[in-house]
Image: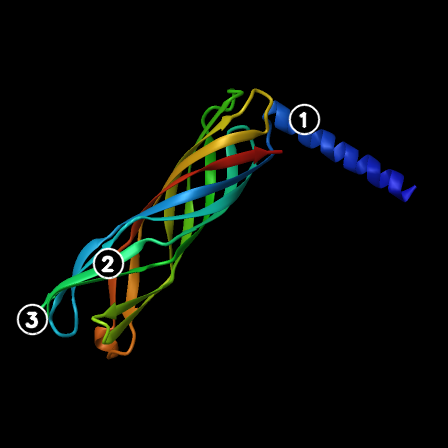
Amino acid sequence: MRYASLSLGVTLLVCQLAVSAEAGEPGWRVRGFGALLAPDTSETTVNGDGDDILIQAEHGFGGGGSVEYQLHRFFGVDAGIVGAGPEVALSADIPGLGSLAVSDTLTTVVITGDLLVHVTPGSPFLDLYVGAGIAAVSPGSLNYDVLGVERLQVEAHSYVTWSARAGLDVAFGQDSRWAASLGVRYVPGDVELRQLDVPAADATGKVGYNILSFTAGLAYRF
C-alpha cells in the first residue's frame, strides 16, 4: 500500500510538471552556459617608489549556470553562478630598467540573485526576459614574476554590488522543454587590491572592475 501511494504521488507530480511545461505556466527553468567575462579596467596607479603603473584587464572565458522559479507568467526569481579568468596586465616605465609588462589570470566568481520580468509570456518559441538584483563578486589573487628576480603578489577582496541582465531562450520546438539560451549581464564595482609583503600604508588601492558578461548555452523547463 505504501508503494502504491508513493507511485500515485510520483505520477501526479510528473503530470503536474508536464502540464506546467506544456502550458508555459509557472515552473522551474534551469540554464547552463559558457561565459565570456569582460571587465572594463584600464587605470593608472602609483606604486611605493613613485612609478606609474598601468592596470588593464582583458576578457576571460568560463562557464556557469542558474536556476529560476517562475512565480507568475510575467515574473520569476533566479539564482546563478558564473566563473571565468580574465587576464590582468601591469605595465610601467621604470627608470634604469625600461618598459616592463607582466600579466596573470584573475579568477573571478560571481554569484547572483535576480528578479526577472518575462516580456513574451504568450510566445510558444521565444522567452525574452530582463531583470536586476544583487551580485557577490569574489576575485582570486594575482602573482607576477618580475624579470625572474622578484615576485609580486596581490590579493583582491570580495565585494557585493548590484547587477542588471537580459536574456533570450529560443525553444527547439513548440512543445519542447529544451531551448537555446543567450544572455548579457552588467555588474559594476571597484575591486580592492592589496599587495603583500609591503608596508600597510602602500599596500591597498581600488580599481574599477565593471564586468560585462555574455553567456550562451541551453535551458530546460519543467
The residue drawn where x is 44% and y is 43% is 34
Q: Residue 204, relative to residue 54: is it above or below?
A: below
Tell whether 177 sits left or right of 85: right
Outermost residue toward the front in this view: 148
Mark 1, Cα crowd under 10 Å, few <14 / some 14-19 / many 20+, is some
Alpha carbon distance from label 2 to label 3:
19 Å
Q: Position of residue 160 (x, y in %)?
A: 39, 56
The residue drawn where x is 33% and y is 53% is 86
Residue type indicated by callout 2: Ala
The residue singled out by tag 3 in the image is: 95
Q: Which image quadrant: the N terminus?
A: top right
The residue singled out by tag 2 in the image is: 89
The residue singled out by tag 1 in the image is: 19
Q: Which image quadrant: the C terminus?
A: top right
Quarter of the image holding residue 155? bottom left
Residue type indicated by callout 3: Pro
Q: Secondary structure at mark 1?
A: helix
The residue drawn where x is 64% and y is 28% is 20
Q: Residue 154, relative to residue 3: is it above or below?
A: below
Q: Position of residue 206 (x, y in %)?
A: 25, 62
Q: Position of residue 175 (x, y in %)?
A: 60, 22
Mark 3, Cα crowd under 10 Å, few <14 / some 14-19 / many 20+, is few
Residue type indicated by callout 1: Val
For the residue pair 26 and 124, the one nearer the viewer reads as: 124
Quarter of the image holding residue 153? bottom left
The residue drawn where x is 67% and y is 26% is 19
Quarter of the image holding residue 119? top left
Q: Position of residue 189 (x, y in %)?
A: 31, 53
